[in-house]
Image: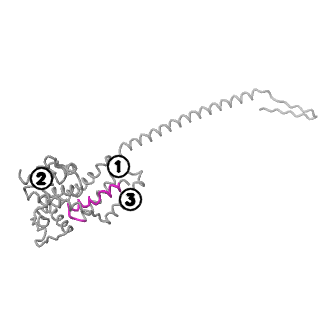
Amino acid sequence: MKCEEIQELISQFSDGSLETEKEAFIFAHMSVCPGCRTFLKSINTLSFSAQREEFYFPPELDKKVISKTEKRKAKKHVNILTMKYPAYVSFSFGAVVILLLFLLFKSTTEYRQELHEAMENMQQQNKQIQTILNSYPEIQVRPKQVNEIFVNRKL
Amino acid sequence: MEFKFYYAKHKSKLYFYVFRMLNDKMLTDDIVQNVFIKLYENMDNINNREFIASWIYKTARNKVYSFLRHKKRKAEELIDDEEPLYSETLTDEMDNVELREMIMSALETIPEEQREAYLLKEYSGFSYKEIASLQDIDEELVKSRLFHARKKLIAKIAKVIL
């Protein structure tokens, strides 16, 4: 195996992803090859430098991102009526509104019908009362005085 | 709350990745800001939280490569004169800070796809599988890209580290 191929395996070894049986193979090679030993040492130096990296994030960018997301959060709450909903939500909402309107219309019609019937009954009862009262005889009042007064009263 | 958790977790490493890919502070600021605002708006749509890191890097990567393609088109006719990365007078007492700077400079000179694989592996801590998914390539190719990146970096800084 050429050094180039061994070094490719060394690269995988440094990532911790080389099969165990191949590890013995590369170490056997490195024991007699200073070039590949140096390659492993160099890879370790690179990895060490990466591990020591102090990641930086600009504070002004941090403020910008936080403030923009906060603004969007506020907007989200205010624009709940105007925001874009998925199609199925809009359709469901529309269907519920139509169903409610239909139920309201139906119950109103029934109520009006009942009211109409009740009024008809009342008028009929009123007529019956009038008829009964009209059938009573006339009342005559005869006072026992000189001048007699006759009162004809029709109820 | 959840957004802030993922933002705090990934912001610095993402910034490092984008900056090292583009080497342009203003552009990096723009891209990183857009990525996190997009993440905020899409938090509800990302059902599996395990994929948030991949989602963040994929979104950033699309923007990075979109810019790099644009830059490449503009620079097609220019001759790329590679400058020496370090002075020949460097001494053996170079400290870690200087070594880091040299690695960063050397990173700029290696091919984009190798540089990206190296940054994702060494600095962002992604696995071969995750890098393969991000770069849309086979895992074997990821191993190969990492090897070539390391080889080139070592060649560039050999005089200092050996």
Could you say which disc has been placed on residue A27 in the image? Answer: 2
Q: Picture coordinates of residue B69 (x, y %)? A: 17, 58
| Chain of the residue displaying label 1 | B
Q: Position of residue A66 (x, y in %)?
A: 35, 61
Q: What kind of residue is marked 2? A: Phe
Q: Secondary structure at mark 1?
A: helix
| Secondary element at image label 3 | helix
Q: Are marks 3 and 1 on the same chain?
A: no
The foreground one among A102 and B133 is B133
Name the N-terminal-most of marks 2 and 3: 2
Q: Quadrant of the N terminus of chain B?
A: bottom left
* Cα–Cα gap, marks 3 and 1: 16 Å
Of residues B30 and A88, the one nearer the viewer is B30
Instruction: Give the quarter of the figure containing the C terminus of chain B.
Output: bottom left
Is the residue A10 above or below the residue B90 in the image? above
Q: Chain of mark 3?
A: A
Q: Position of residue B67 (x, y in %)?
A: 20, 59
Q: Quadrant of residue A88?
A: top left
Disc 1 marks which amino acid? Asp
Q: Which residues are magenta?
A: B3-25
Could you tell me residue A119's position as x and y percent?
62, 33
Side of A145 relative to B16 (left or right): right
Residue of label 1? B44
User: Which residue is tagged 3?
Assistant: A70
Q: Residue furthest bottom?
A: B89
Instruction: Check the image and report above or below for A117 versus B72.
Output: above
Residue at the farthest left position: A2
Q: Nearer the viewer, mark 1 or mark 2?
A: 2
Residues packed near mark 1 inside 10 Å, few (<14), some (14 to 19) or many (20 plus) = few
